[in-house]
Image: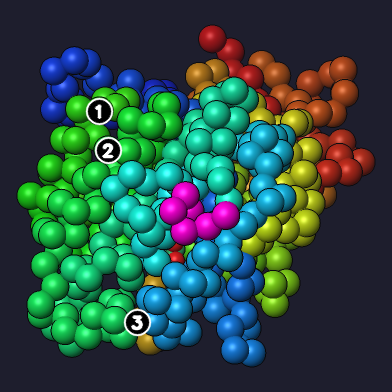
C-alpha cells in the first residue's frame, strides 16, 4: 500500500499495471491490462448471498443469529439439512428485477453465490445432486436467469464459489495445527485425518467450475472464497482451467497462493491506497445471508462515503444483499440502493473509470496507540478521484465559505459542483502550497456533493 507523492501522481494519472502477461490459452491471448480494464472502470458491484439457508432468515430452534453458516452454527446433520434444502422454493425470484435494482443503483457487476459452504449448488449442476435442480420443486435455474438478465442489461455476471469449505462433501478438511477441523462438517464426517482434499477437488470443484464457465455465458469474475487447504498446484491447475475456458475471466485473490488478479478486503476499507486492483466486500447490515432479525442497516450516505473512500484509494466496492427464501431482496436494501443510485446519477462521472487521489494527506496518518494498535488519525472530510485533466473533490462536510486543498499543479480552468446548475465557475485561488475554492453559500441538498476541477491542457 502507498502514500501518493502529490505532484508526481497528478502528472502520472495513468495506470501502470504491475502484472506480467498471463499464461496464454491456445485459443486466445489476453494481456492482464485488457482483462482487468472493465473491472478497473466498473468500481461498484452487487454481492448476493442467497441459498437454501435464506429460508431460515437466520432463525433455527428459536435462535435468531444464524446466517449462511446455518448448517454449521446450528449443528444440523447433513441429512436434516438436505431435507431442509428440499423445501427451498423461491417463487418470487425475478432475475430481471434484481439486475435492474443493481443497475439503477449504479452497479456494473453482480456476484452471486453459486455454491456457499453448505455445498448446495444454486444452479443445475450435472456433477452433483446436492443442487437446486435435483433437491427442490423449483424447476428453474436461478443462475441461468441471472446470467441472461445481466447479459441483457449490460451488467457483468460473476459467480462466487466456496473453494475450501463444503459441508456436503466428505473430503474437505479445514484448518491446521490447533485449528484442525475448525470449519469442517464434523457431525457427518468426524475424522478429519481421513479427508483427502484432492478427491473433493477432482470430484466437485473442477467439474463445477467447468460447468459455470461453459454453461452461463461470459463470466466476469470467478469470486472464490475461503481457499482453505487447497495446494499451490491445485490453485495453479484451477487458474489454468479458467484461463483456458474463459481467458478474459478475472479471478479474485481467494483462489489462493497469491494467484488471483486482485486483492480482497472484507468488511473493512484499507487505510492506504494501491495501484494494484483491489476490492472491499461489505454488508449493508451485519449479515451476508438474509437474517430477518438484523435491522442494523447502514445509511445510504455512509455507503456512498465508503464507495468514494474506496475509489479514492484505487479500489472497487462490492456491496452485499441477502435475499429472502422467497427470492426477494429486502426492502431496506432496495431503498438504500435507490438512494445510492440517485447520488450516482449526479456524480457517477467522479467514480467510473476514475483513478485514485492525487494527494494523500486527506487519508490521514497511521499511528500506533499505547496498546500498539495501529489507528489512522487526521483524516480530512473530503476525498479525491481523478481522470485525465480532471480532479473530483468529494465533500463529506460542507466547509464554511471556502475549501482549502493542497497545491494543484497546472492551471485550474474551471471548477463547478456536479449537478448544480451554476453558470460561472467557482472562484479558485492558488496561494503558496494551497489551493482555495470559494463555495456558494447554499450547499446542494444532497449528501456528499462533488466539485469537478478541470485542468488546463
Ligand atoms: O465465510 C464466508 C462468509 O460466509 C461470507 O461469504 C464472506 C464473504 O466474503 N466470506 C467468508 C468469510 O470470510
**Which of the 4 image quarters holds residue 390?**
top right
Nearest-to-viewer mark from 3 and 2: 2
* Residue in front for this viewpoint, 178 or 119: 119
Whole-percent x and y of residue 438? 78, 35
In this rendering, the label closer to the viewer, 2 or 1: 2
Which mark is nearer the camera, 3 or 1? Answer: 1
Magenta stretch containing residue 194, yes or no? no
Is residue 123 placed above or below 41 in the rendered structure? below
> Where 406 falls versus 169 (above or below)?
above
The reply to whether the magenta stretch includes residue 136 is yes
Quadrant position of residue 260: top left
Left or right for 147, reference 272: right
- On residue 372, which mark appears? 3
Magenta stretch in the rendered image: 132-137
Find out whether the residues at labels 2 and 1 contact each other: C-beta distance under 8 Å: yes
* Circle 1 residue: 245
- Find numbered disc 3 in the image and state the secondary structure of the residue it sits on: loop
Whether 407 is drawn above or below 232: the answer is above
Main secondary-structure element of the magenta-colored stretch: helix
Q: Earlier in the sequence, mark 3 or mark 2?
A: 2
Q: Residue at x 7, y 49 (%)?
A: 233
As drawn, is 189 to the left or to the right of 23? right
Image coords of residue 333 (percent x, y): 71, 55
Q: Earlier in the sequence, mark 3 or mark 1?
A: 1
Amino acid at each position: 500500500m502507498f502514500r501518493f507523492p502529490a505532484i508526481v501522481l497528478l502528472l502520472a494519472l495513468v495506470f501502470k499495471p504491475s502484472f506480467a502477461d498471463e499464461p496464454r490459452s491456445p485459443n486466445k491471448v489476453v494481456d492482464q491490462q485488457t482483462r482487468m480494464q472493465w473491472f478497473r472502470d466498473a468500481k461498484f458491484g452487487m454481492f448476493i448471498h442467497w441459498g437454501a439457508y435464506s429460508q431460515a432468515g437466520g432463525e433455527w430452534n428459536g435462535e435468531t443469529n444464524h446466517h449462511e453458516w446455518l448448517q454449521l452454527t446450528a449443528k444440523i446433520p447433513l441429512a436434516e439439512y438436505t431435507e431442509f434444502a428440499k423445501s427451498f422454493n423461491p417463487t418470487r425470484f425475478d432475475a430481471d428485477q434484481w439486475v435492474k435494482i443493481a443497475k439503477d443503483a449504479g452497479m456494473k457487476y453482480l456476484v452471486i453465490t453459486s455454491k456457499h459452504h453448505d455445498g448446495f449448488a444454486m444452479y443445475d449442476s450435472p456433477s452433483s445432486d446436492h443442487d437446486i435442480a435435483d433437491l427442490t420443486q423449483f424447476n428453474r435455474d436461478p443462475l441461468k436467469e441471472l446470467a441472461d438478465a445481466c447479459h441483457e442489461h449490460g451488467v457483468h455476471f460473476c459467480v462466487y464459489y466456496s473453494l475450501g469449505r463444503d459441508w456436503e462433501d466428505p473430503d474437505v478438511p479445514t484448518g491446521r495445527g490447533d485449528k484442525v477441523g475448525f470449519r469442517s462438517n464434523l457431525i457427518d464426517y468426524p475424522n478429519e485425518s481421513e479427508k483427502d482434499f484432492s478427491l473433493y477437488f477432482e470430484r466437485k470443484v473442477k467439474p463445477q467450475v467447468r460447468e459455470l464457465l461453459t454453461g452461463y455465458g461470459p463470466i466476469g469474475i470467478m469470486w472464490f472464497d475461503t481457499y482453505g487447504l487447497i495446494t499451490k498446484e491445485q490453485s495453479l491447475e484451477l487458474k489454468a482451467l479458467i484461463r483456458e475456458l474463459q481467458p478474459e475471466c478475472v479471478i479474485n485473490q481467494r483462489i489462493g497462493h497469491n494467484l488471483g488478479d486482485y486483492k480482497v478486503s472484507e468488511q473493512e476499507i484499507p487505510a492506504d491506497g494501491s495501484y494494484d486492483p483491489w476490492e472491499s466486500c461489505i454488508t449493508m447490515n451485519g449479515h451476508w445471508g438474509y437474517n430477518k432479525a438484523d435491522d442494523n442497516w447502514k445509511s445510504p450516505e455512509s455507503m456512498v462515503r465508503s464507495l468514494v473512500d474506496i475509489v479514492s484509494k484505487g479500489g472497487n466496492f462490492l456491496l452485499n444483499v441477502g435475499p429472502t427464501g422467497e427470492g426477494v431482496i429486502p426492502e431496506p436494501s432496495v431503498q438504500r440502493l435507490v438512494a445510492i443510485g440517485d447520488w450516482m446519477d449526479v456524480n457517477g462521472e467522479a467514480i467510473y473509470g476514475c483513478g485514485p487521489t492525487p494527494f494523500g494527506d486527506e487519508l490521514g496518518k497511521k499511528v500506533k496507540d499505547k496498546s500498539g494498535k495501529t489507528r489512522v488519525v487526521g483524516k480530512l472530510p473530503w476525498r479525491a478521484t481523478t481522470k485525465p485533466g480532471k480532479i473530483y473533490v468529494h465533500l463529506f462536510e460542507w466547509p464554511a465559505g471556502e475549501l482549502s486543498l493542497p497545491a494543484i499543479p497546472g492551471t485550474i480552468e474551471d471548477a463547478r459542483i456536479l449537478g448544480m446548475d451554476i453558470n460561472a465557475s467557482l472562484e479558485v485561488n492558488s496561494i503558496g502550497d494551497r489551493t482555495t475554492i470559494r463555495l456558494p453559500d447554499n450547499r446542494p441538498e444532497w449528501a456528499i456533493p462533488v466539485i469537478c476541477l478541470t485542468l488546463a491542457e
